Amino acid sequence: MANISWKDFLTATGLLVAAYYIGALAYYYSKELKTFFARLPFSAAGNIKYGDKATHTSQIKNQKQGSGELEELNLLATEIQQMLRQASGEELVRQEIIASLQSIIRKYQNIRDTPTLAMLHAFIEAETKKFCSISLTAEEIKMLWDG
């Protein structure tokens, strides 16, 4: 015990506290971090040259063409989540929330006939429960596409 200096002790304690708070932030804000990192530009090889705007732009266009459906699904999910967060703060009633969801989904009609639709329906169901304490039935969620 006599071999440990105060400097070593404080350094080790500081590193442990920093690691604890980084872990806590990662745990509590994992969805936001995933969304943030998913939006960062990168290529499949990971070699974007940030100084070369033409290369960067062409790589982004290639990514969009390859993952257009998933990107659009991600945009829809983000927009739905933002609306539900706002709705929970404003305490909107069930019909107002459904109408808001319909107006958002109306912009993404090309996702309607994709294999990811079931996943999106589960997401909508879970997020409305989470943010607004509302349970939407499967029929109500299907009707969102018709509104």
Image (tube, grey):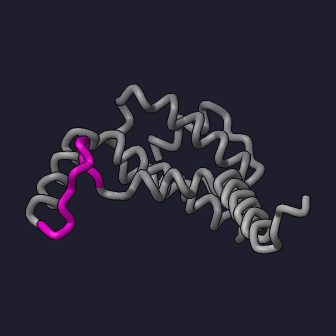
Q: Residue reaching furthest left?
A: 54
Q: Position of residue 106 (x, y in %)?
A: 40, 51
Left or right, residue 16 beside residue 100: right
Q: Position of residue 133 (x, y in %)?
A: 77, 50
Quadrant position of residue 111: top left
Looking at the rendering, which quadrant does residue 50 occupy? bottom left
Which residue is located at x 35 percent, y 30 percent? Answer: 113
Percent coordinates x, y for residue 80 in the rendering: 53, 54
Q: Magenta stretch mostly in which secondary structure?
A: loop
Quarter that holds the N terminus: bottom right
Q: Is residue 44 magenta?
A: yes
What is the residue that sits farthest to the bottom in this orientation? 7
| Residue 136 in sight | yes
Residue sitting farthest toward the front: 3
Residue 37 magenta-drawn?
no
Residue at (64, 54) in percent of width and height:
26
Q: Is residue 43 left or right of residue 116?
A: left
Q: Is residue 93 visible?
A: no
Spot the residue most to the right: 1
Residue at 47% across, 47% down = 147
- The structure residue drawn at horizontal position 47% and vertical position 59%, both measured from the top left corner, is 36
Marker count (numbered): 0
Picture quadrant where residue 9 is located: bottom right
Q: Is residue 39 above or below residue 123?
A: below
Q: Which residues are magenta?
A: 42-52
Q: Is residue 137 left or right of residue 101?
A: right
Of residues 70 and 129, the one drawn nearer to the viewer in this rendering: 70
Q: Position of residue 138 (x, y in %)?
A: 62, 31
Residue placed most toward the observer, 67 or 130: 67
